[in-house]
Amino acid sequence: MSKKYSILIAVLLLFSLLAFGCSQNDTSGNESGEKLSPKHGGTLRIAIDTTTALDPTFLTTSGDNQAASMWNDYLVFCGEDGRPDPERSLAESWEYDEAEKAWTFKLRKGVLFHDGKEMTSRDVKFTFDRLRDPDVGAKTVDLFSNIADITTPDEYTVVFKLKETNPEFLLDLADRAILDADNPDLKTKANGVGPFMVESYNPEDRIVLKRNPNYWRKDADGNPLPYLDGLELIVIPDKTAALEALRSGQVDFMYEPPSESLELFEKEPDITLYTKPSATHYLIRMRADVAPFNDVRVRQALKLATDRQEMLEAAFDNFGVVGLDTPVSPAYGDYYLDAPEPKRDVEKAKQLLAEAGYADGLKLTIYSPEIRPNSAIAVIWKEQMKDIGVDVDIQLVPSDIYYVNWLDYELGVTDWGSRTHPGVFLQQAYVSGARWNETHWSDSELDDLAAKIATEMDFDKRVEMYHRVQEIFMERGPIIVPAFKHSAWAASNDVKGVKPHIVETAVDFRSVYLERE
Amino acid sequence: MTDMHRSKETIVPDPILDVKNLTVTYNTDRGPVYTVRNVSLQIAAGEIYGLVGESGSGKSTLARAIVRYLADNGQIKSGSVKLGGTDLLALPMSKMQQVWGSRITMVHQDPAAAVNPAITIGEQIAEIARLHLKLSSAEAKAKAIEMLKKMRMPDPESVAKRYPHQLSGGMLQRVVIAIALTTNPQLLIMDEPTTSLDVTTEAAILDLVRELLTEYKMAVLFITHNLGVVANICNRVGVMYAGEILEEGTVQQVFRSKLHPYTRGLLGCLPKITDDKRNVSLTAIPGYIPRMHQLPSGCIFSPRCSMVEDECKTVRPSLVEAEAGHFTACRRWEILKNKPELLMDSQHARDFTKHEEGPVVLSASNIKKHFSVSAGEFASLFKRGQTKIKAVDGVSLGVRGGFTLGVVGESGCGKTTLSRCIAGLEEATSGEIELEGELIPYSVAKRTPAQRKSIQMVFQNPDASLNPHYTIGESVSRPLVLMGLPKKEIQERVRQLFNAVNLPEDYINRLPHELSGGEKQRIAIARALAAEPTLILCDEPLSSLDVSVQAALINLLIKLQDSHKISYLFISHDLAAVRYISDWIAVMYLGRICEIGSAEDVFMPPYHPYTEALLSAIPIPDPDVRQERIRLEGSVPSAINLPSGCRFHNRCPRKIGRICEEQEPPWQNVSEHHRICCHITLDELRNLQSEVIVRQADSPREVRQC
Amino acid sequence: MAICIQSNQEYRHSKLFSIWRGIRRNTLTVIGFFIVTLFLLMAIFGPLFVPYDYAEQNIEKRLQPPSAEHIFGTDEFGRDVFSRVVVGSRNVFIVAGSGAALAVLLGLFLGLVSGYWGGLLDDVLMRLMEVMMAIPGLLLAMLVLFSLGSSFYSVILVVGFMYIPVVTRVVRSVVLDIKTRAFVEAAKLRGESIGYILFREILPNVLPHLAVEGSMRFVYAIFMVASLGFLGLGVQPPAPDWGFMVSEARPFFSVAPWVLFFPAASIAILVVGVSFVSDGLRRILLPGGVSSDRYA
């Protein structure tokens, strides 16, 4: 008997040793030999989402974007407010020639790739040629189909000739990693101009980056950036797990903490929560080309019967702002039409339904990915629709399966991430024949406005047109947008210099530093 | 429990095993059950003590209590157990574990279960030597070979390398005995060691034990239900009944004087090899073995005793020393003294109406049943040549109306397969079966209902022959239901049948698990009778029953044969029972009949050498009977590799030469009804053979000159 | 060793009574039966007496801890957790129960046929069963439900089919044992039809094993239904599927653990309860009879 127990105890001890050993995380990485300023030094551990590709041409997941932003720099750097920032861009300056419809960019000199080669206009041309090349097949082919030609008059000048005027061309170009034209193996060799260099790439586990000693930017005092010696990007797809890792000190920073646990942050003195309104939204969308949704009265009735505030509270845990059934978020500043939320009017809704011929009620099936908040939106909506005699049957589907058929569902709950400007949404999803037009909506006034917006250079005029677009959506659109979710990040208090960005994955780590007590 | 047993130290000086007033209880839901009550016994060195009893007597419990290996709910309530002076009950369990296997060893009933199938024979013996004798590896190996030699094992070196499954039952039992004797124990306990062996093998093992005892001077506690074995091998015997020892003494004393009514009853139950049903009827002991938690007051045997008095029922008698070393627990033992035939004379001549031989009801001609050995359906599709087991290889016999044909043989002779072929449960490979002159199909499914009715079967295992979910009334009435009789008549018939088998009518609604083995077998017979058959096949119907119950059942079968004029095909390995009940006997060996004739003729010379060997091997519960000693070498060969020529030639003690190996022996007619299949001429046999079993007794009929 | 019993037999208890006695004897079995009865009553009568409609949302009162108004608290939509747990029990019993019953019925039939006939039929059936068993159950269920769409009936079918092989094998092994017994041979000798032999002679002896195995399958079925529900393959919301309730409650675990605790505990307790019952049945029904009659 005693023999059995001693073996058991020995095994238990062994296991606890192993567990203990594993959980020991490296304390801050070795300080660099010369400490330049108190801010310099330290390794930051960041929890990121699943990554799929190293090649910046093929960024798909948030994880890809989060990782790519660490070791790349851009021709046009998009600032935290969503406007181009020349200070941080590789282009020192730019000019637009209306007559030629040509954008000319002057590049900085002496910018080196990680392998030491200097960046020239050739690399810039290579990058954008690649991004618009249908044979390469990046997602940006359509976006850049407007580019007629890219020329490089000299080593530090790039000229983009457009076919049509594009007022938001800078934003379209923004945040595209500049690639090394001589890199034979873009898929596995990461050679960029960014602040950090890829040391090891393990997409299942972690990406380790170290400081780029030749990085071209300096801070306000002239100290070389970045402050951090290195980054460890640890892949933790499960948000709850990432939150736990942050709380236990295994990581220092995470993107998008789960909204369900935001209450906890009040109780955690060592963690800081950063938030910012974003353009990410979820919508209930209807196929405008089939019955019953092809009747605008039905669409209006369903929209009238929806209580968006409830959804914001229950599905988003109040972490966001109520939507107005348009894809334009308050984060877009002036573009956003600040109208009041339509009041819920059950009687009117029933009346509209009766007029449309559904006095006896309606039976609908809504498809939704099984994750929150989509599933929660569906559940809440179903209850709300009961009040006007509409019986909704919920069909939950695993997320990857949902996005196989998402364009065909008659009624579904889809989510849309941020875009640089709302025009992208229109082009991608709402004009007739758009590639991702899940509602199959075809409204000639909308198409018209969208086309004008795309080429109108005058800002105020564009604002007016965007407002009109939103009115159209509210009047007769086939989508219900209950809320715009805020972006959020969480970091330990040691992490300083974090600036919330309109695009959740684009937080700038160049000026982030550690202040460990 | 107020009885005291007189201490018996004066009888056995210096006993190795000294058990005094041992009481063992089991804790059950209904309170403690006293399975062994106040039992004392002593065994000296070099002595074999036979502990005899039927089921429920507590003999196994006693053995377990002595070695302190009771079940979790068993407890030694009082008494003492001393082994060579050591008080075993006072030892802590760790010390007791050292006693096991070295100072006390056991041999059990099933040798295959006692050995590890994954270890070679030599290694198993060597393991004991290393563990208890602390020998080195090499020494232990040598010791193993030595032990096997002592067991008279042929070719011990090669046997030591074999695995248990490659040895026969008899050889395995020798190995188990070898393991038991390796450590030269003080006490060897043998619990029914030969019960599962064939009678010829049993005889050889008993010989072995007797011989070993001259060399190893240990005490042996030999537990068995078989009185014949006890008479054969034991020095002293104790008769146990329902937890108490009722009589104890030397074998001569107990078997001759029989100073307890129970002993008399037991011995009276047994059919003697020299008796048959026409002369004597068997005494069955009336009543039932009492349930342990409902013991009778007074003498525990009183409810069943034929000389019971009122005082017997109130006062628990104690063991009295009737003569030197002979103890009995009967108050009235003096009446029994000097009157060896008292209570046994109910074995008087039976009222037996002799009939004429009726016509042949069943005739089997040249029945062959061959099984092909294959590895399942798929494999058999690919096999080219198939090995065959020739279980029955050319058997012809006939059963006449109202008469019993007994088929006797050891394991592997094919008697069960033969009966199943006749019943139709197996399809014979070739041959003809005629029922009342009409040829019937091999398979029961193809026979007509009338044919099926005519042949019924009583099976060996009474527990399995009745569906546990139906009342016995339902089981018995099923054949009647199939016959299409109206309900009223069925009920009436069932009552009649119950009467015929001596079961009370209120049993009709009982479930099988509420009945004893004997009662279940009666129901099986009743069910067979219900169909009004011409022939009943009895396949070892008595083997799983107690001795006293067997007697009652034999009596019943005979009575029924008398009243209903049924024929029996009675299959058994128990020669005495077969001799008693059969009119005709066929002796089978390896699928063939080697001798067939009337019961008296077969048991008298000239014998087929195999019959001779069988007769010499049966243990006879009578120390006054002299038996020839003829032993067979080896064991029954496998039916796949049949010996050429005469099948018996490689074991036959009377083999005459090459002819036995090459040619099949011819049938020789001793008389009109008696045939022997042997190469030796009848005259030669008559010269060579004398009666195997001779009773040194009064009745002159039995002693015959050759 | 046959033990003789005295002829004046005491009153023979009815089968049910002996089962009841058997249950009483073991504390764990009693607990098991108590739990199962409790949940069964909850499933049958509960939905009639729940304080709230299981789908009734009250967003203002979301994620409330247990209180007098809501004894199990409220979930993310303000629905009463207690009402949802009670109504959900019905789903569990019906779906898991039907699935197990399906497996038992079909397995019984296949096992009888396969065990009794043997031969090629048996070989083929057994290989088929082995193939079915080789595929991991949950994966198979997911595959089938993805393609067929998950509904009440498809889940029952999937759960049922998943457990047929085990039941078949158990029944078959019992049949193999019983068909060699003398009373079956006696029946053959009487010329009884195959149907009689299978259903009147063999089947009654298989039933105890089937009861034990069936209750065991019920345990597994409950767990499987909960697992499928957790993955979103059970009945669709807002129907209160315990497994899905656990899955919905997971993100809120740090903030409102009761939402996860109550459905998870219900699953666990019911599974444990049925498991005790199954063990108890095994002890009582097999091997044959109430064990106090035996003593060595």
Image (cartoon, coloured by chain):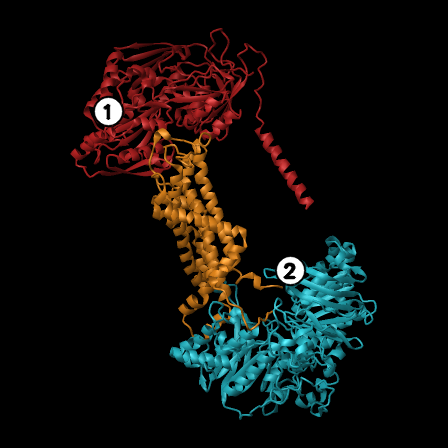
Secondary structure beneath dot 1 equals helix
Could you say which chain is coloured red in the image?
A: A
Instruction: Name the kind of residue labelled 2 in the image.
Output: Pro
The answer to whether residue B160 is seen in the rendering is no
Task: Give the colour of chain B.
Answer: cyan
The answer to whether residue B15 is seen in the rendering is yes
Instruction: Name the kind of residue labelled 1 in the image.
Output: Phe
Secondary structure beneath dot 2 equals loop
Q: Position of residue C181 (x, y in %)?
A: 51, 69
Task: Give the colour of chain C.
Answer: orange
Q: How many marks can you see?
A: 2
Location of mark 2 (residue): B117
Chain for disc number 1: A
Do marks 2 and 1 share a chain? no
The picture quadrant where one finds residue B630 is bottom right
C138, C261: nearer the viewer: C261
Q: Do the residues bearing badges 2 and 1 touch, measured as CB atoms within 8 Å?
A: no
B620, C280: nearer the viewer: C280
Location of mark 1 (residue): A473
Q: Position of residue B612 (x, y in %)?
A: 67, 82
